Image (spheres, helix red, strand yellow):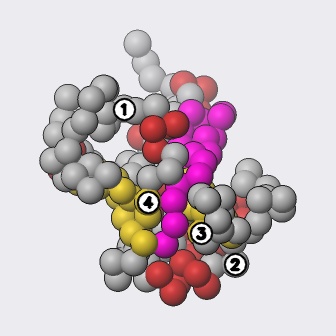
């Protein structure tokens, strides 16, 4: 298994810090263990907590983390979808870091708990990824083939001679 700092970026979240805790992490962990983790902006401000981890069921990849901002008793008044690749898991501080200022996150229109966007809509997803300056997770990295995309199915890959 590779160390967190030596893993190549494949559109997933980066892992920093020396904390490991108990269990199988930090490379593989239960999504529920991430709920409630605080999120820190690039200017060091606590901007909210992770309320949900959204999976792309067809590809088997994490698509977004939902940030709950504001609210009372941990119930966010305002929600933001953050592309999974825009987050860095800081195991030493037990939080996520996002490379955007607190104000830029607050300026993201987001949504409320009763009016979720259609997260499978590629137009919505492309605009969100652009806002966070990330390539959409469902698109191969520049120079990569479809078979290089984690979660791509054999039918999506070019045929190979055996």
Say what secondary structure mark 3 lies in: strand
The reply to whether discs 2 and 3 touch (Cβ–Cβ < 8 Å) is no
Q: Label 4, secondary structure: give it.
A: strand
Nearest to the eye among marks 2 and 3: give it: 3
Q: Nearer the viewer, residue 94 or 146?
A: 94
Residue 117 x/y as whole percent: 78, 60
Give the residues drawn in magenta, as a range: 47-64
Q: Nearer the viewer, residue 121 or 72?
A: 72
Q: Name the residue tied to disc 4.
A: 38
Q: Is residue 80 above or below residue 52?
A: below
Q: Residues within 10 Å of mark 2 (few under 14, many from 20)?
A: few
Q: Say which residue appears at 66% left-offset and 59% top-offset.
A: 75
- Identified at 44% across, 53% down, the residue is 37
What kind of element bears circle 1?
loop
| Residue 54: image location, x then y, percent | 62, 46
Name the residue tied to disc 2: 109
């Amino acid at each position: 298994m590779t160390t967190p700092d030596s893993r190549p970026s494949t559109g997933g979240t980066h892992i920093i810090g020396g904390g490991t805790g108990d269990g199988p992490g930090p490379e593989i962990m239960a999504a529920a263990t991430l709920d409630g983790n605080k999120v820190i902006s690039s200017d060091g401000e606590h901007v909210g907590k992770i309320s949900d981890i959204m999976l792309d069921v067809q590809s088997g990849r994490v698509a977004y983390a939902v940030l709950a901002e504001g609210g009372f008793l941990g119930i966010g008044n305002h929600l933001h979808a953050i592309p999974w690749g825009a987050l860095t898991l800081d195991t030493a501080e037990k939080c996520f870091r996002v490379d955007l200022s607190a104000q830029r996150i607050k300026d993201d229109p987001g949504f409320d708990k009763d009016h979720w966007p259609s997260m499978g809509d590629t137009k919505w997803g492309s605009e969100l990824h652009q806002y966070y300056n990330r390539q959409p997770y469902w698109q191969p990295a520049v120079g990569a083939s479809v078979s290089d995309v984690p979660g791509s199915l054999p039918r999506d890959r070019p045929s190979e001679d055996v």
